Image (cartoon, rainbow, N blue to C red):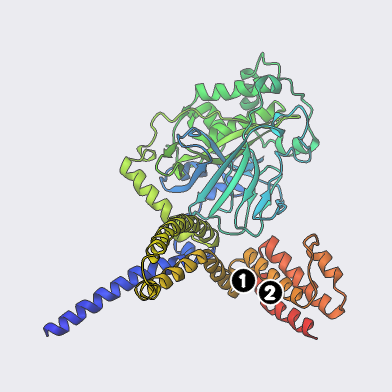
């Protein structure tokens, strides 16, 4: 029995040790695809209904009741939390029927710039191009940041106003004329860049009152209103001579004469805005923003509401902002000819901010751990693997250099010793050691190449998991194979030019078909096209052999 117990103990130790060694290796060599099984397991089934194309008054207030984390944002170069009051813009809404806001604009596909980059349109005036010398937003500073969304069920990208581009592993993105960006795919991690330049008030005061017809159609629409609302707008803005000061007057009036609360009647009133402005005089951000936008429209000033988030808490352990559902927010954008849309926020501070927004030091450590888990386990993909491989390769080079120095020192000592020692005796004593050291040195020197070859082999075997990388690998294989047969692609030739240069019609047809699917896989990241490349490669090989 004792020998059996020892055997079981030894077997258990060996098993645990093997698993401990194998798990990190399996984790590294088997990255998950962006929309893989672990991402699906992470779904918490919480859908943020306040970020669709139709939002009922009060829905943002319902979201604010939750303390769930919705995203983490890292601003490049920010290690002190300098952007704690930044707004993260989601959906802009322009059509109001008295009870709900709607977005009637139809999204269009965004151009793909390659390398996962999507160029977001410059701040749009609904057909009115804003790239004028007078507009400082065309040359202002850019804010670069990285967003890691929790699986909250939204198809909206949240960006700092106003977005310039998005970089991420997505097949297609769409954007409406109000600047809202969408996708049909689960949103995980993305990089983004925004122009956060604020136009100076003196310039906005000089803006004309003339604006494109499309702006008037989309952002001067009014439902049937209580007659007191337009009268209040006129009274509040009396004495103001330009649209900027009128907008600022309405913003300040609402922020100073009304109170903030999330505790509202469960039964919606017949006229929510009139109830808010003249009876209850308390509400949350949706009511303040809606009141301001509608009051400005009665003054013939184009305005719309925007749903998004505010970031307040900064985790210095990860240099990222923790954005919670309770920080959902609605604000106003006002249109100024030649300058586009400017942000206004009439909502006063919450006099009783929830303690859930503040996280203890222990909570920050737990949040950092959770962020690590989401990024390096749930969202670990080929991009993360490449980044990790690069870091390992750099560390390996440093270690390799140290090993080389140590081996050279040992070599010179042996050479010096050889002068006074019989060569045969030296080889008998140190020959095996030298051979082992040389073999290790050669292996270490080629470690990066071996890892690269193994990675290429894996990607080529399952091209649909990493379409862009697989497309490059298979295209390189195809051109190398043809070069060995005397049909070499010149460095200056584009893929299309190379196809045209092939004389044999059958080979040209096979290469042309391969190239079409290669380009769709590489630049469109279409998995179906990438999956066809191995078979198309065989067709090119067969045509080349004839």
Q: Quadrant of the N terminus?
A: bottom left
Name the outermost residue toward the front: 420
**Residue 32 in sight in this render:** no
Closer to the camera, 111 or 25?
Answer: 25
Decide: few, some or many residues near mark 1? Use Cα within 10 Å; few <14, some 14-19, many ≥20. many
Closer to the camera, 53 or 38?
Answer: 38
Q: Secondary structure at mark 2?
A: helix
Decide: few, some or many residues near mark 2? Use Cα within 10 Å; few <14, some 14-19, many ≥20. many
Q: Quadrant of the C terminus?
A: bottom right
| Residue at 40 percent of width and 61 percent of height | 416
Q: How many marks?
A: 2
Instruction: Specify the label residue 533 is tagged with.
Output: 2
The answer to whether the residue labelled 2 contacts the one labelled 1, judged by CB atoms less than 8 Å apart, is yes
Q: Position of residue 14 (x, y in %)?
A: 27, 75
| Residue at 49 percent of width and 54 percent of height | 152
| Residue at 57 percent of width and 33 percent of height | 289
Q: Secondary structure at mark 1?
A: helix
Report which residue position mark 1 lands on.
463
Closer to the camera, 376 or 66?
Answer: 376
Q: State which tag comes first along the sequence, 2 or 1.
A: 1
Instruction: Specify the label residue 439 is tagged with.
Output: none
Mark 2 → mark 1, Cα distance in angstroms: 8 Å
């Amino acid at each position: 029995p004792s020998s059996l117990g020892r055997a079981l103990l030894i077997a258990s130790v060996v098993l645990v040790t093997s698993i401990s060694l194998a798990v990190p290796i399996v984790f590294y060599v088997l990255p998950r695809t962006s929309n893989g099984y672990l991402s699906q397991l992470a779904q918490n089934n919480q859908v943020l209904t306040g970020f669709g194309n139709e939002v009922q008054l009060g829905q943002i207030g319902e979201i604010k009741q939750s303390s769930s984390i919705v995203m983490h944002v890292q601003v490049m170069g920010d290690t002190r939390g300098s952007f704690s009051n930044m707004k993260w813009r989601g959906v802009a809404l322009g059509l109001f029927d008295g009870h709900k806001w709607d977005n009637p604009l139809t999204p269009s596909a965004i151009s793909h710039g390659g390398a996962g980059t999507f160029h977001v349109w410059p701040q749009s005036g609904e057909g009115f191009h804003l790239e004028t010398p007078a507009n400082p937003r065309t040359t202002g500073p850019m804010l670069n940041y990285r967003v890691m969304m929790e699986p909250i069920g939204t198809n909206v990208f949240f960006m700092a106003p106003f977005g310039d581009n998005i970089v991420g592993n997505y097949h297609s993105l769409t954007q409406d004329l109000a600047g809202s960006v969408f996708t049909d795919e689960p949103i995980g991690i993305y990089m983004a860049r925004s122009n956060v330049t604020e136009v100076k008030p003196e310039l906005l005061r000089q803006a004309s009152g003339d604006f494109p017809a499309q702006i008037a159609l989309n952002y001067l629409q009014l439902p049937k209103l209580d007659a007191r609302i337009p009268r209040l707008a006129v009274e509040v803005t009396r004495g103001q001579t330009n649209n900027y000061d009128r907008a600022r007057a309405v913003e300040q009036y609402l922020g100073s004469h009304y109170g903030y609360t999330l505790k509202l009647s469960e039964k919606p009133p017949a006229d929510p805005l009139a109830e808010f402005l003249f009876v209850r005089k308390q509400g949350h951000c949706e009511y303040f923003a809606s009141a301001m936008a509608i009051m400005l429209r009665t003054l013939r000033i184009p305005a719309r509401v925007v749903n998004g988030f505010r970031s307040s808490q900064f985790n210095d352990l990860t240099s990222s902002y923790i954005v919670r559902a309770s920080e959902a927010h609605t604000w106003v954008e006002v249109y100024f000819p030649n300058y586009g849309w400017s942000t206004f926020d009439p909502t006063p501070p919450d006099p009783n901010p929830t303690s859930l927004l503040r996280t203890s030091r222990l909570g920050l450590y737990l949040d950092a751990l959770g962020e690590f888990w989401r990024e390096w386990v749930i969202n670990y993909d080929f991009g993360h693997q490449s980044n990790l491989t690069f870091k390992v390769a750099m560390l390996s080079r440093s270690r390799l250099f140290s090993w080389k120095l140590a081996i050279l020192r040992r070599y010179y000592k042996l050479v010096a010793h050889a002068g006074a020692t019989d060569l045969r005796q030296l080889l008998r004593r140190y020959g095996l050691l030298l051979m082992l050291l040389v073999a290790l040195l050669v292996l270490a020197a080629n470690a990066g190449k071996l890892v690269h070859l193994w990675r290429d082999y894996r990607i080529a075997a399952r091209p649909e998991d990493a379409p862009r990388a697989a497309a490059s690998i298979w295209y390189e294989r195809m051109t190398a194979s043809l070069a060995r047969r005397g049909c070499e692609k010149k460095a200056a030739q584009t893929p299309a030019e190379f196809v045209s240069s092939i004389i044999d019609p059958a080979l040209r047809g096979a290469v042309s078909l391969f190239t079409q699917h290669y380009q769709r896989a590489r630049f469109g990241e279409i998995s179906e096209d990438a999956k066809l490349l191995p078979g198309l490669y065989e067709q090119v090989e067969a045509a080349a052999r004839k």
